[in-house]
Amino acid sequence: MAASPDVENRVEDITRVRSREIATRVLLAGFALLILAVPFLGASPFFITLLTEALIFGIWAMSLDLLVGYTGLVSFGHAASFGFATYAAGIFAMNVSADFFLSTMVAILTAAAVAFFTGLVVTRLSGIAFAILTLCICQVLFQISVVWRSFTGGLDGLIGVPLPTLFGREVEPGEEFYLLTAATLIICYLLLRRVVESPFGKTLLAIRANEDRAAAIGIDVRRHKLVILILSWMTGGVAGTLFVFLKAGANPMSLYWIESGNILAITILGGIGTLFGPIIGAIGFIFIRDQVTTMYRAWQFSFGLAFVLAVLFMPSGIAGIAERIWRRLWPARS
Amino acid sequence: MDWNFLFVNSLNGIIYGSFLALTSLGLSLVFGLGRVVNFAHGVLYALGGYFFIIFLPSLGWSAMLFAPLVVVPLAIAMEWLTIAPIRNRDEIYTLLVTFGLSFMITGAIEYLWGTETTLIKPPVIFQGTVDILGNQFPVYRLFASTLSLLVTGLVFVFIQFTPVGLKIRAITDDNEMAEALGINTRWLLTSIFGGAAGFAAFAGALGAPIFSVEPEMGMGIIIDSFLAVILGGLGHLPGTAVGAFIVALAKSIGGGYIAEWAIAVLFLVVAAIMVLRPKGVFGRGRIA
């Protein structure tokens, strides 16, 4: 994908770079605090619910960024990770226990299992072939969710998923559930940040830059792809679990390929390879869609246009532009 | 076993297949020539259907020819503005850009012409039914699928027996060598892109009295076309045509017995083929 922005750093002053990094962390911490503080700032219940959905999409888009941004694998079937988890967590919560941790574990583990078997096949491929194959696999899951009525409820989906419980106490919808979502997002971000900054994450960047060369210097490309695919699906599974509790139900449309396209567009518009960008992309998408669809019928056209322009002219997305401005505010060159 | 049920489903499959062959052929051709994965091919088919029903009241049935004539320049402008600038980038970008385009155009269709489904009546001379082995079959279906097959056949003849066709095959075989021999690949890709769009639009117009016209029609057929193209091997035209019939028959025959499971199985089969025979069932196409 896009050239690594790190190249620009070469001639920069190391102490200045460090001070900019600290500033970046302060900024991110401020953002995290802001997200956690939203319910205490007198936001309306409607706004809170909308923001909850946006943050869930943020987790999901982050999980896709692991594939698209950090490994160079454009998945056109990432609805699978999310949609599959909505069913796994929903069915578990309805029949066994609505405990949030248990449901999340079930969703994560089943998502990991499906990702493992999917990965055995899709990791052989990259580029266009990977995109189309992931699309096919997602459609298989979509069809199964529609046809297997006794288990999934067919086109109606799951209805009447109970409220989640946390430490034996029911999480109330609205502000409490929002705080749960926000905390989950922050934890996911911190964990994934560690992953992408680890030697493993750097190896992924090598695969993204050139798969053949990475293999030539002894990197087990398929193994790395498999691990990141599983990790990505597990993170998508967390998002799916939150979503099924938010909506109190699951719907086969979250497995449909157009949903995969949506989340891919959100991730790319937000800025791939940044983890943070996709969260911004998701918040922007959910809020603009909500504001706009009621009064402006050309929403889908505009969204498509924005995506086309982004791919053509700013492949690094919103986060890429923000980063450029940030670098100018904190110049690291003397 | 109910043979008649099987027969009717097969016949419907063949009819859908003859349309699918026409759309997937364009998809395969554009991929073979320029390594462009045109996700927007489906919405060009939809545009064909829409321009047809718009022109129909004033132009009558000649609208079927005018609809593609409007879509072709649109497609050429699309190629020139969005695909040509990224030809030097990774192929995956063509998939992303055309995906965005298909979103845009579907949105534009809904904005301009609403979300209703329109089913128009076939022309008066084709409105009757014909008796095939005791089944009443609409004449128009048979006529339209024959015409569609005929056009598909003409595309093959064009590619196999004309000088331009020879150039197209040369580029598909080895792009750089063809360019070194003095073939203007840039110009040829743009015109083939336009031509493929024209055939897709024609299929959309021709199919309007059978499959009806609605905003999402392009999104449906693009997925089936992708399956057909992968089955036959990307860029391999005869394989693509066979792939189209496999997909259509699997959907209509399989659908008759095991309902939607048939589609799940079809996707699994295509996924297996991508991995086990990445060059398609005939081993003549190319992928990745």
Image: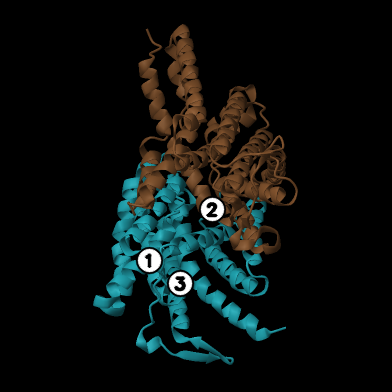
Assign a secondary structure to mark 3: helix
Q: Colour of chain A?
A: brown
Instruction: Look at discs 1 and 2 and give the one toward the viewer.
Output: 2
Looking at the image, residue B156 sits to the left or right of residue B71; the answer is right
Q: Chain of mark 2?
A: A
Q: Looking at the picture, how far across and down is residue B116, in whole percent?
A: 39, 68
* Mark 1 crowd level (few <14, some 14–19, many ≥20, 10 Å Cα): many
Residue corresponding to mark 3? B153
Q: Looking at the picture, how far across and down is residue A323, in whole percent?
A: 41, 24
Looking at the image, residue A21 sits to the left or right of residue A304; the answer is right
Q: Looking at the picture, how far across and down is residue B5, in whole percent?
A: 64, 82
The amino acid type found where label 3 is placed reads Gly
Q: Give the numbered dot on residue A257.
A: 2
Height in image: A248 above or below A209? below
Residue corresponding to mark 1? B201
Q: Is label 3 in contact with label 1 (beta carbons under 8 Å)?
A: no
Q: Colour of chain B?
A: cyan
Report the residue at 63% width, 75% height from top. Answer: B256
Q: Chain of mark 1?
A: B
Assign a secondary structure to mark 1: helix
The amino acid type found where label 2 is placed reads Trp
